[in-house]
Amino acid sequence: MKYHKPVMLDETLAHLKVVEEGKYIDMTLGDAGHTLEILKKGGKVLGIEINEDALRRAQARISEEGLEKNFTPCLGNFRDIDKLVNSTEFAKVNGILYDLGYSSYQLDETAIGLSFQSEAPLDMRLSKELGVTAADIVNSISEKNLANVIREYSDERFANRIAKAIVTNRDLKKIQTTKELAELIKSETPPDYEKGRIHPATRTFQALRILVNDEIGNLELSLPRAAQLLLPSGRMIVISFHSLEDRVVKQFGRGAQPQLIKVVEKPLEPEEQEVALNPRSRSAKMRIFEKA
């Protein structure tokens, strides 16, 4: 089975300072790439995953490696971390990791519809407990609100044009699939969009995904709650992938001082070699904090 390659793995292990029998929380388990290496070093891990299929997949991978003894799986939203650690041995921990990117499996999973690379329902919900889908949003909210969402969550400079095209087209036929939306956006943007570096639908899909899953709100709630779980000298690592996420993390770090100390002044970025091998890592930024 092919698994997602964890981003900035060497940097994560170096700065997390994993110790044998130490306790760690992987807030975004995904394919368990980071967690596996922590387990191999003798650490104990609580792995949190909001998507049930992804959690099962990660558990199977960890079992295949014979590392399940020190692994505790947890289905839930990391915004509720203070509640999720109840009745576990992870009420106080040596380290916490957030990798806010999506695994290749999640991006390619057609049932979720996070990507426009294949035809899929326009859903984007990582958890089916969430009520509103991306299709609900694009087919119901006003043109002005839709443009604001696209602009705010992705910095898309053609937000007004895209929103207008969506509203015009949905009046004729509801937009139900990823391909329908992607092709519509492509038809309304310049042929030389971003000089061909990204697909014209990339930013709009990002904005919808953030809104559907309340990614920014979840992060804002989770970070201070997670910080309360760190032991003295315990470390928190956050790997973000777009400016909105990084801004939240940066502001959290400022507000958490002097209880949390910045380990690095500027965020770390992946080495050129890693970007060449894993292009999805190119926008990653790592911030590191330590409990005073």
Image (cartoon, rainbow, N blue to C red):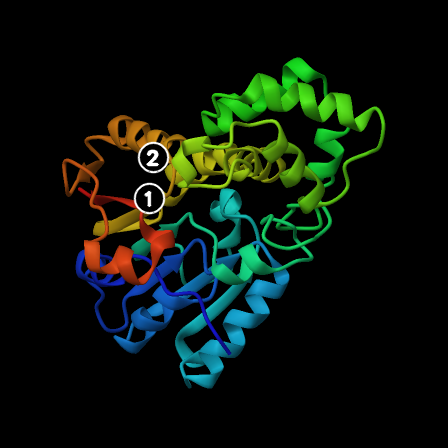
Q: Which residue is mark 2?
A: 246
Q: Amino acid at mark 1?
A: Ser
Residue extending furthest front?
191
Q: Earlier in the sequence, mark 2 or mark 1?
A: 2
Residue extending furthest top?
144
**Number of the label disc, if any, that sits on residue 173:** none
Q: Position of residue 191 (x, y in %)?
A: 51, 32
Q: Position of residue 73 (x, y in %)?
A: 51, 67
Question: Does residue 24 appear in the picture of this structure?
Answer: yes
Q: Position of residue 233 (x, y in %)?
A: 18, 50
Q: Which residue is mark 1?
A: 283
Q: Nearer the viewer, residue 97 or 45?
A: 97
Q: Amino acid at mark 2?
A: Asp
Q: Is residue 167 above or below residue 256?
A: above
Residue at screen point 62% across, 65% down: 53
For marks 2 and 1, give the one nearer the viewer: 1
Residue at screen point 33% across, 42% down: 227
